[in-house]
Image: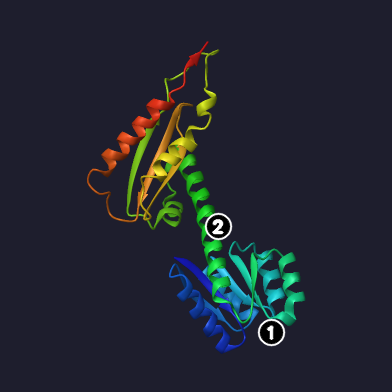
Amino acid sequence: MIRVVVIDDEPFLLRNIKQSIEQADPDYRIVGEAYDGEEALHIIKTAKPDVIFTDIRMPVMDGLELITELKKNETEAEIIILSGYKEFDYAKKAMKLGVSDYLLKPINPVSLENLLSEIKMKLKAGKKSQQTLWLRNQVKYAAARRGHENDFLSLFGEYKYFHLFLLCIGPYHTVTGYSVGNPRFSDPDEIIGTTVSELIREDEDFWIADGAMSNERVLLFGSKAFSFQKGRLENLSFQLNTVLEEIIPPITV
């Protein structure tokens, strides 16, 4: 679920924007609304949205002032401004403040759908990077595995089932002066990732991290279902083993 706060001083437009967002993409959920920037600051602090849609011209605190305050507070949410044609100069000022994008009112349904799709891809990529970094830290710093339950839940809470693979790519090389390499397979992570991407479903995902040794990779699977279907793990193991056998590089002295 992508959490959204909408700010507009006109009740009719506010209601219309909320409905348009949720109808355009069910992954978006409205978690807060406000009629001016000052009210919005309190709501945003509590609701912690992923995306903020805000009007430019509002009483008490307008959109530009709101954006300035949000940037001071280092808000990580994607900020989308809503403006009319007459307010385009305000929109340009807002873009300089670092907002993600803008929509002209009245909102075009196609433009909204395209924007929501782009934001979702960006948020997903950002979260994937955080998840991969978390996994790498757990592998690299064994002691860090304890006491980070909250981080795990915030990053992986939507997944119900996990499976962990330790992949060994080629022989161990522990003698100084030995090198392992093959130009054809300079990026095993990409090869593994491509293989796995073709096998998983939409409600599944995976993350790759370096193992304790240079020829090891840790592969974590997550499923939003409570388990993988019978036989899928065996098939996945077989496919990975087939790929790894093909990319074992030679040792040159």
Residue 101 visible (yes or no): yes
The residue under label 1 is which amino acid type? Val
Asked whether, in this view, residue 215 is left or right of residue 59, the answer is: left
Query: Which mark, residue 198?
Result: none
Q: In the picture, residue 122 is in which quadrant?
A: bottom right
User: Could you say where residue 196 lies in the image, as x and y percent from the top left?
Assistant: 39, 42
**What residue is disc 2 on?**
122
The residue under label 2 is which amino acid type? Lys
Element at label 2: helix
Query: Which mark, residue 60?
Result: 1
User: Could you say where residue 38 lies in the image, as x and y percent from the top left?
Assistant: 64, 79
Name which residue lies at 47% across and 75% down.
22
Name which residue lies at 30% across and 56% down.
225
**In the picture shown, does residue 126 fall above or below 79?**
above
Residue 143 visible (yes or no): no
Q: Which residue extends farthest left?
A: 230
Element at label 1: loop
Name which residue lies at 42% across and 36% down.
218
**In the picture shown, does residue 88 fall above or below 208?**
below
